[in-house]
């Protein structure tokens, strides 16, 4: 029977769309010097369920009460090249459980040392709304090519293929859902700032997270939080297409332009305006209210609401992503 101490850490990816940008709720753990997600250890004696414990952590740390919540993933792997979970409990093994929460009306300031940070702060290569991010060809592609060249021939080709398909190199298509795969490739290649920290810890040394070896590859985070954040973004992007989760991020009454900008902020890709509107109306998920929004800053636009009852009664539907 093993005597290894195991701690279960709970982390929350709390997402909102603010001023047209997808943002995540972050905290500043004392002494860490890096942002993190709201998190804490699960207490089997004091917490009845993981979700109730998570809700309590988030409210305690940020002053924000969660609405929509779903479990993302459980990271418990040992012996693989992956960001290490650490909740400061001194355990030999940490099982990290991530949750996704969506906020339609985030408060401006929830608590001290708490803030809303754009996705692109952590993953600058994920926002294609204004075109292909320059960091991919200027920094990521050459760094991954150099990493591939260090390996034997067969492994080098496998590394090049992964880079090509994940980062849309050599005219490969971009798949916006593979956020976690892209971050883990950068981590495996030693390009994510957290990689040097974790490899030093595995060797028995303690080093702070320094700047990434290649500039421009995003803000590092404490523990395995950037990995959990990547999982949350990828999950949410996928769910847009088959579940009406985007309406958990909108106000009760919205214009179709607002809805499109919300979908674009999450997916990171630009959408064709007319094709998107026609496709949304065909889903039956929205109902026109017969009133105009006069605060658009331009021509008044028709207001809509989410048909929550119809969505609950029928088959699960998401929104199409007709690219521009």
Image: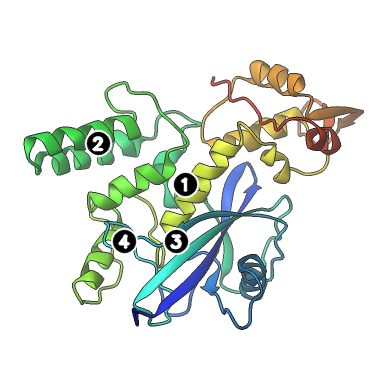
Q: Earlier in the sequence, mark 1 or mark 4?
A: 1
Q: Which residue is mark 3?
A: 225
Nearer the observer, 248 or 318: 318
Q: CA distance from mark 3 to mark 1?
A: 15 Å
Q: Nearer the viewer, mark 2 or mark 3?
A: 3
Question: For this rendering, which residue is in front, 187 or 131?
Answer: 187
Q: Earlier in the sequence, mark 2 or mark 4?
A: 2
Real-space Cα separation, disc 4 to disc 3, in angstroms:
10 Å
Q: Which mark is residue 194?
A: 4
Left or right: residue 147 versus residue 276 is left
Residue tagged 2: 141
Q: CA distance from mark 1 to mark 2?
A: 18 Å
Discs 2/4, front? 4
Q: Which numbered disc, 2 or 3, marks the residue that appears first in the sequence?
A: 2
Residue depicted at x 57% and y 43%:
236
Taking the spot 48% from the left edge, 72% from the top edge, the residue there is 8
Question: Of discs 3 and 1, which sits in the foreground?
Answer: 3
Separation of marks 1 and 4 at Cα, in angstroms: 17 Å
Q: Is label 2 in a helix, a strand or a loop?
A: helix
**3 or 1: tag closer to the N-terminus:** 1
Instruction: Mark 4: give few (<14), some (14-19) or many (20+) Cα within 10 Å.
Output: many
Relative image position of residue 194 (x, y in whole percent): 31, 61
Report if residue 191 is visible in the image.
no
Q: Nearer the viewer, mark 1 or mark 4?
A: 4
Q: Position of residue 208 (x, y in %)?
A: 29, 72
Q: Residues within 10 Å of mark 1 (few under 14, many from 20)?
A: some
- Residue for badge 1: 120
| 247 vs 255, nearest the viewer | 247
Q: Is residue 258 left or right of residue 161?
A: right
Above or below for 269 versus 81: above
The C terminus lies in which quarter of the figure? top right
């Amino acid at each position: 029977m093993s005597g290894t101490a195991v701690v279960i850490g709970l982390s929350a990816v709390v997402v909102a769309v603010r001023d047209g940008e997808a943002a995540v709720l972050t905290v500043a753990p004392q002494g860490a010097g890096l942002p993190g997600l709201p998190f804490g250890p699960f207490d089997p004696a004091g917490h009845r369920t993981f979700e109730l414990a998570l809700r309590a952590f988030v409210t305690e740390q940020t002053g924000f009460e969660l609405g929509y919540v779903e479990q993302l993933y459980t990271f418990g792997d040992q012996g693989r090249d992956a960001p290490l979970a650490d909740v400061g409990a001194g355990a030999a093994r940490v099982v990290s459980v991530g949750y996704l929460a969506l906020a339609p009306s985030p408060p401006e300031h929830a608590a001290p040392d708490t803030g809303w940070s754009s996705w692109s702060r952590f993953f600058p290569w994920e926002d294609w709304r204004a075109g292909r991010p320059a960091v991919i060809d200027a920094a990521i592609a050459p760094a991954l090519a150099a990493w591939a060249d260090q390996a034997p021939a067969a492994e080098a080709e496998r590394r090049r293929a992964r880079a090509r398909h994940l980062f849309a190199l050599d005219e490969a298509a971009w798949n916006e859902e593979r956020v976690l795969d892209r971050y883990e490739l950068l981590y495996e290649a030693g390009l994510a700032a957290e990689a040097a920290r974790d490899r030093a810890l595995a060797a028995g040394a303690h080093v702070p997270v320094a700047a990434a070896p290649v500039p421009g590859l995003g803000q590092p985070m404490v523990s395995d939080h950037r990995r959990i954040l990547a999982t949350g973004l990828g999950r949410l992007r996928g769910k847009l297409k088959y579940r009406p989760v985007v309406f958990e991020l909108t106000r009760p009454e919205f214009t179709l332009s607002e809805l499109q900008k919300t979908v674009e902020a999450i997916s990171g890709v630009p959408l064709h305006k007319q094709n998107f509107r026609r496709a949304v109306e065909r889903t039956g998920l929205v109902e026109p209210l017969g009133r105009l929004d006069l605060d658009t800053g331009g021509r008044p636009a028709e207001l809509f609401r989410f048909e929550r009852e119809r969505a609950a009664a029928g088959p699960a539907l998401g929104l199409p992503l007709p690219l521009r």
